[in-house]
Image: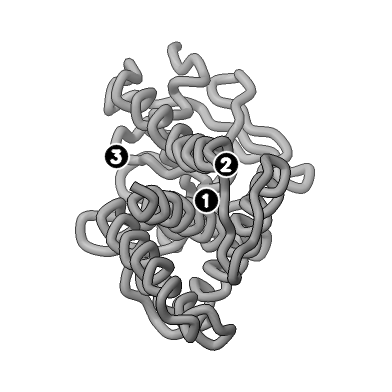
């Protein structure tokens, strides 16, 4: 029974680590890839009990490089950022585990952290909590009572200058800022390109890309204040719309009228 709990603890910790790393680089990881990488990490930890070589610093560094392969296929630069995110997440989650373990009577034995049941429960709760914001946002989007062809007046204030845009409520726009969870509007405003530094993962039917967003000083939809970010499209939008709003914004703001 002990080895099953040991594998479960490490599996949950690895899942939490990858979720934190995903937020750090604003790149989503599919649940299947996360589960597979976490399972391999759990067996790696189990093997380390019988092979002390796997507990050495070089081996731990190598495991971090392997963990980064859980992210979608990317270039060398992106892979380097993902490796850095994995190590950063390891410091964060590892520090949390140590604090909780020692607070609840845990201890170190032969380089292995032995945690009690309260720590395991806390790790499971922490892992579940990382999935809740995305789940809530998806449910709100599914139940948003919004006409796909509904237009609204979008007003944004950036550096004291106000922009008035004719915005389309696009049910296909599910963009959110990964860390804060705030919804993201999209507009073609090349004059603001130098001020957009927040990476927003974007995916279409044929490709994946990164848009860059900024936080307006004020955002209003049909005269009502709304929370959200503005991502800049690299090219003009099709049709008569000057901006695209997500159904998540429709759920927070009255778009009627």
Say which residue label 3 marks: 172
* Kind of element beneath mark 3: loop
Tell me whether circle 3 and circle 2 mark residues in contact (CB < 8 Å). no
Q: Residue at x 50, y 57 (%)?
A: 17
Res 192 visible: no
* Kind of element beneath mark 1: strand
Task: Give the camera-side residue of 196 and 118.
Answer: 118
**Left or right, 169 with reference to 89:** left
Say which residue label 2 marks: 119
Q: Residue at x 57, y 49 (%)?
A: 115
- Residue 131, position in %: x, y? 43, 39
Query: N-terminal of the two: label 2 or label 1?
Result: 2
Tell me whether circle 2 and circle 1 mark residues in contact (CB < 8 Å). no
**Left or right, 17 with reference to 35:** right
| Cα–Cα gap, marks 3 and 2 | 40 Å
Quadrant, the C terminus? top left
- Residue 229, position in %: x, y? 58, 42
Q: Local crowd at mark 1 within 10 Å, few (<14), some, or many (≥20)?
A: many
* Kind of element beneath mark 2: helix
Mark number, residue 40 = none
| Cα–Cα gap, marks 1 and 3 | 15 Å
Q: Local crowd at mark 2 within 10 Å, few (<14), some, or many (≥20)?
A: many
Q: Local crowd at mark 3 within 10 Å, few (<14), some, or many (≥20)?
A: few
- Residue 31, position in %: x, y? 30, 51
| Cα–Cα gap, marks 2 and 1 | 40 Å
Mark number, residue 231 = 1
Query: N-terminal of the two: label 1 or label 3?
Result: 3
Task: Give the camera-side residue of 113 and 92.
Answer: 113
Q: Residue at x 27, y 64 (%)?
A: 207
Task: Give the camera-side residue of 212 and 93.
Answer: 93
């Amino acid at each position: 029974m002990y080895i099953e709990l040991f594998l479960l603890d490490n599996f949950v910790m690895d899942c939490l680590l990858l979720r934190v790393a995903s937020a750090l680089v604003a790149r989503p990881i599919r649940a299947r890839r996360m589960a597979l990488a976490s399972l391999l990490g759990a067996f790696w930890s189990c093997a380390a009990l019988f092979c002390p070589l796997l507990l050495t610093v070089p081996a731990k560094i190598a495991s971090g490089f392997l963990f980064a392969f859980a992210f979608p296929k990317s270039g060398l630069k992106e892979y380097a950022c993902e490796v850095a995110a994995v190590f950063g997440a390891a410091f964060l989650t590892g520090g949390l585990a140590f604090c909780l373990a020692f607070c609840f009577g845990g201890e170190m034995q032969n380089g292995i952290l032995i945690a009690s049941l309260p720590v395991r429960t806390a790790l499971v709760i922490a892992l579940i909590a990382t999935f809740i914001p995305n789940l809530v946002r998806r449910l709100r989007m599914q139940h948003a009572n919004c006409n796909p062809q509904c237009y609204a007046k979008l007003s944004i204030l950036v550096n004291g200058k106000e922009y008035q845009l004719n915005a389309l409520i696009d049910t296909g726009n599910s963009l959110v800022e990964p860390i804060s969870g705030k919804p993201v509007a999209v507009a073609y405003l090349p004059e603001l390109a130098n001020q957009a530094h927040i990476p927003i993962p974007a995916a279409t039917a044929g490709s994946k890309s990164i848009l860059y967003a900024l936080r307006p000083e004020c955002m209003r939809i049909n005269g009502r204040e709304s929370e959200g970010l503005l991502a800049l499209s690299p090219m003009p939008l099709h049709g008569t719309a000057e901006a695209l709003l997500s159904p998540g914004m429709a759920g927070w703001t009255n778009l009627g009228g």
